[in-house]
Amino acid sequence: MLRSLQSLFLSLVVVIVVAITIGSCVDHDLAPPVVVNCEGSKTVSYVNDVIPIINTHCAIQGDGACHNGGNGDDINWTKLTNLQNHASELERRVKLAPSDPDHMPRIGKLELADITLLVCWVEQGAQNN
């Protein structure tokens, strides 16, 4: 009987320790998403504002090149219609914390000003302007 109680107690302690350990596994380094306020901002130009960001950070050549057509025509962001079709995903990913695995760009870093331009362009309707 005593052995049974000791075994039960030990099992309960193990379960509690495992539960506490698993429950405390939180990525404290994961920053919150970027907050962008487009209210009252200037009209973002696809030609003057968006294309330069895409060409510099997204449609690059070499290792990590993703949106220059090399990984499929559908995700070639140098084509306006492709970018428009994926605009909400573009907005979601550029606003994620750099430590998030879905964050874009995967190589390099966008400045807050560039993130703001991309997000506001999307929120203004992702127009060809």
Image (cartoon, rainbow, N blue to C red):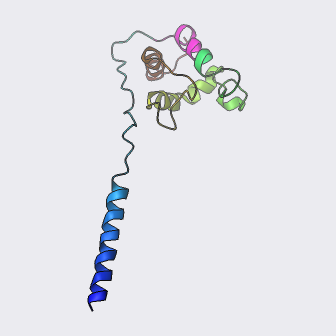
In this rendering, the answer to whether 28 lies above or below 83 is below
**Residue found at x 52% / y 32%:** 89
Give x and y (percent) for residue 87: 53, 27
Along the viewing direction, whichever of 14 and 86 lies nearer the viewer = 14
Give x and y (percent) for residue 101: 51, 38
- The answer to which image quadrant residue 120 occupies is top left
Q: Is residue 72 left or right of residue 125?
A: right
Q: Is residue 47 left or right of residue 7?
A: right
In this rendering, the answer to whether 84 lies above or below 12 is above
- Counting labels gives 0
Boundaries of the magenta span: 44-53
Give x and y (percent) for residue 91: 48, 28
**Residue found at x 34% / y 69%:** 15
Give x and y (percent) for residue 29: 39, 37
Residue 47 painted magenta: yes
- The answer to which image quadrant residue 84 occupies is top right
Which residue is the extreme one toward the bottom?
1
Q: Considering the image in quadrants, where does the N terminus appear?
A: bottom left
Along the viewing direction, whichever of 4 and 39 lies nearer the viewer = 4
Residue 116 painted magenta: no
Along the viewing direction, whichever of 75 and 110 lies nearer the viewer = 110
Q: Considering the image in quadrants, where does the C terminus appear?
A: top right
**Residue found at x 42% / y 18%:** 112
Which residue is the extreme one toward the top?
48
- The answer to which image quadrant residue 77 occupies is top right
Instruction: Name the dominant secondary structure of the magenta segment.
Output: helix
